[in-house]
Amino acid sequence: MSRVLVIADHDGHQLGSGCSRCVTAAAKLGAAELHVAVFAAAGGAIAAQAAELAGVSKVLVVERAENAHLLAAVLAPQVVKLAAGYDYVIGPANTFGKDLLPRVAALLGVGQVSDLMFVESAHRFRRPTYAGNAIVTIESPPEVKLVATIRTASFAAAGGGGSAPIEAASTDAVLPTHTRFVSINAAKSDRPELQSAKRVVSGGRALANSENFQLIYALADRLGAAVGASRAAVDAGYVPSDMQVGQTGKIIAPELYMAIGISGAIQHLTGIKDARTIVAINKDAEAPIFEVADVGLVGDLFKIVPELTALLSKASG
Amino acid sequence: MKILVGIKRVVDYNVRVRVKPDGSGVALDGVKMSINPFDEIALEEALRIRERNQATEVIVVAVGPEEVQTQLRSALAMGADRAILVKCDQPIEPQGVARALLAVIRQEQIGLAILGKQAIDDDAGQTGQMLAALWERPQVTFASKLELQAEKAQVTREVDSGLETLSIDLPAVITTDLRLNEPRYIKLPDIMKAKKKPLAVTDLAALGVNAMPQFRVVKTEPPVPRARGIMVKDVPELVAELRKRGVVS
Ligand SMILES: Cc1cc2nc3c(=O)[nH]c(=O)nc-3n(C[C@H](O)[C@H](O)[C@H](O)COP(=O)(O)OP(=O)(O)OC[C@H]3O[C@@H](n4cnc5c(N)ncnc54)[C@H](O)[C@@H]3O)c2cc1C
């Protein structure tokens, strides 16, 4: 009969894709009460989306001008106040949750489970270490409040159709002024979001420049896919950093992942291991990406990708 | 201003780690150990700040067993002014490391702490945020650009939606992302010089830090391997295969 508090990720308007994965994880933790907390300047619309997630028993909205941008130093004291009375405080293991929850845990004087990927029982969990090459099973003492970030790729999105009550909540937390938001430079894109997309097409160093990445975009658009990249492609400036997939980028679990001109370093593979079907296109038959690929094609991407895009267009056009 | 940089000894990123058959952990015998790559980036950033005369001293601090001295010496060779080893032979969780670092910060009157955003062994990604919380100071995680002004810093961080810029008051904790800088290589004369630099050894008890782990590690297993895939010979075959699997229409 546990009580779980999920801290919602959002962009100020829309609920993030991590929240519904956390709701699924919360159910596995045996939540009798499953509450979602939305911290925002104006959180009504976001709360309404959270209330629709199946399994949620209540949505708490904490509206304060200071919550206009989700700054960990500002949110953490509020989460701590709200956390009283819950057995679990969880959030998504994306840049929002990874920034916030360790700060919350430290203020609560407890440890944290990062990237929780499997719930064995209420106090026994699995998480990946060494870029996913060693999975550890850990136990936490039942009497200690558990703070965790949820590896979103390991849990399905919760269903819809719910209608949980929405309540305004307030905390008397004193908020610091030492951290101020300046700006966000977010690439606007009509393509699906990388972390929740059903299909992802990624390009690597082999693309050689940003113009050539148009080949990847064209194929992705043909498939209705999101676009990702290896670290090498990001470091070289072919694409922005928010497209990096891997240990230190985004961990994704699409139905289809296409790795094009990517060698398959362990740091990249850890980000895609949960994809249902992995397709690799690489001119080097010995590339490690072929060890994890479900379907591999050896050859020059500059020949293969345009042909693939054209063939897919023809058939479905 | 003094800068503290956290250093962790980890299995080198080029090593393919293997889980021990008895499930007791990862095989470490004879495996190459290095400074956690993100900590090297943290150190490089601190050195650049000092070289711009915005800091007086760069102190590298590690919490761990005696062997960590090797990595602290490498950090000194890279250019740190002195090192502190907080000895700890037991496994320690990020919360314990954060408490130990905070104790050092208070002793040394640190103005800026730069840590890696995660260590590539446990991949926990917690220490910097926990340190900032306990210190009651600002944190900027996943930093890709750092500009110091008097008593303040403007820091850009890599977030899922793009690049976010924050302005913070110092002291503060910064955690580094990959693109903050490219660490310098160590030159041979620097290794010689590093031997003469001060390396102080203390321990958790001397710092008054309790670092009892909260979690019990039950077992360590390799990941479930993916089923063996197939190779196709050309694009039409690829498309046919994808259709067969129902992943494209
Ligand atoms: C601490 C740390 C963290 C890291 N985190 C990440 C991470 O999160 N994500 C990540 O991706 N990497 C990460 N890396 C980097 C990783 O180790 C690799 O360096 C990187 O993934 C390589 O990118 P790549 O496959 O694009 O480039 P390469 O390894 O250079 O591979 C390019 C591939 O393209 C193929 N190729 C070349 N030309 C063609 C052609 N015309 N047609 C077809 N194929 C061609 C080559 O055969 C080769 O296999 C990290 C590294 C470290 C140290």
Image (cartoon, rainbow, N blue to C red):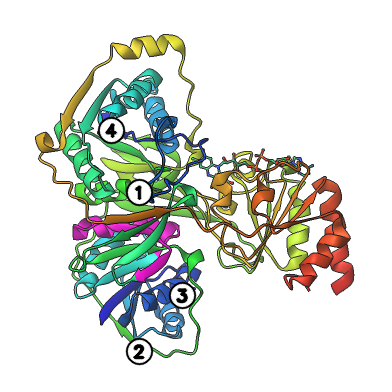
**Residue at mark 3 to residue at mark 2: CA–CA distance:** 17 Å
On screen, B88 above or below A306?
above
Report helix, strand or loop for mark 4.
Answer: strand
Amino acid type at image mark 4: Ala
Question: Disc 4: which chain?
Answer: B
Ligand 1 within 8 Å of the CB at mark 4: no
Depth check, mark 2 against mark 4: the one in front is 4
Amino acid type at image mark 1: Ser
**Residue at mark 3 to residue at mark 1: CA–CA distance:** 34 Å
Instruction: Quickly name the residue at label 1.
Output: B24
Instruction: Quickly name the residue at label 3.
Output: A20
Whether label 3 touches label 4, CB < 8 Å: no
Coordinates of residue A279 in the picture (x, y in percent): 71, 57
Ligand 1 within 8 Å of the CB at mark 1: no
| Snapshot quadrant of residue B121 | top left
Q: Is residue B11 left or right of residue A278?
A: left
Report helix, strand or loop for mark 3.
Answer: helix
Mark 2 is surrounded, within 10 Å at the Cα level, by few (under 14), some (14 to 19) or many (20 or more) other residues, namely some
**Residue at mark 1 to residue at mark 2: CA–CA distance:** 46 Å
Question: Disc 2: which chain?
Answer: A
Ligand 1 within 8 Å of the CB at mark 2: no
Residue B107 seen anywhere in this rendered image of the structure? yes
Mark 4 is surrounded, within 10 Å at the Cα level, by few (under 14), some (14 to 19) or many (20 or more) other residues, namely many
Mark 1 is surrounded, within 10 Å at the Cα level, by few (under 14), some (14 to 19) or many (20 or more) other residues, namely some
Coordinates of residue A242 in the picture (x, y in percent): 56, 53
Instruction: Quickly name the residue at label 4.
Output: B62
Between residue B149 and residue B225, name the one nearer to us. Answer: B225
Depth check, mark 1 against mark 2: the one in front is 1
On screen, A277 above or below B32?
below
Amino acid type at image mark 3: Ser
Ligand 1 within 8 Å of the CB at mark 3: no
Instruction: Quickly name the residue at label 2.
Output: A165
